[in-house]
Image (cartoon, rainbow, N blue to C red):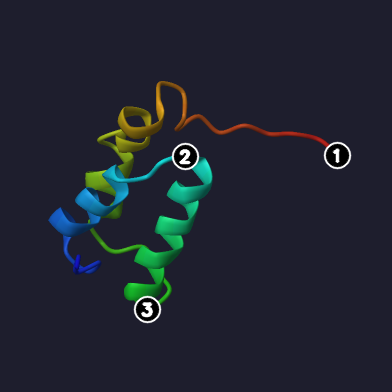
Amino acid sequence: MEDLTKSKDVVNFMEQSKDQVDWNNKIDDVKRANGGQYPSFWYVDIVTSRLVDKVLGPGSSEIRITGA
């Protein structure tokens, strides 16, 4: 079982994501384990590493705005 308060475990946990919905659910799990907040290492280890693009494919980290 991963310790979702430790960087290495969170990276491994996120790498197991199957799709965008799973990725988002895993983010919720990580935040829950860290008192409802992103852990301090999140930006460096997840965002700047572009892990989501590596796991879910190029462009997955891009912000998309859609209208209703």
Amino acid under label 1? Ala
Q: Nearer the viewer, mark 3 or mark 2?
A: 2
Label 3 element class? loop
Q: Callout 2 environment at 10 Å: few (<14), some (14 to 19), or many (20+)?
A: few
Residue hosting label 1: 68
Q: Quadrant of the C terminus?
A: top right
* Whether residue 44 is situated above or below residue 35 in the rendered picture: above
Label 1 element class? loop
Label 2 element class? loop
* Whether residue 57 is situated above or below residue 35 in the rendered picture: above
Residue hosting label 3: 35
- Cα distance, mark 2 to mark 1? 23 Å
- Seen as rendered, the residue at the extreme right is 68
- Seen as rendered, the residue at the extreme bottom is 35
Q: Nearer the viewer, mark 2 or mark 1?
A: 2
Residue hosting label 2: 19
CB atoms at circles 3 and 2 under 8 Å apart? no
Q: Quadrant of residue 51?
A: top left
Residue at 31% from the left image edge and 49% from the top image edge: 14
Amino acid under label 2? Asp
Earlier in the chain: of badge 2 and badge 1, it is 2
Q: Position of residue 25 (x, y in %)?
A: 47, 57
Q: As rendered, which of 27 and 67 lies closer to the eye?
A: 27
Q: Position of residue 31 (x, y in %)?
A: 39, 67
Q: Quadrant of residue 41?
A: bottom left
Q: As rendered, which of 52 and 38 lies closer to the eye?
A: 52
Q: Position of residue 55 (x, y in %)?
A: 33, 33
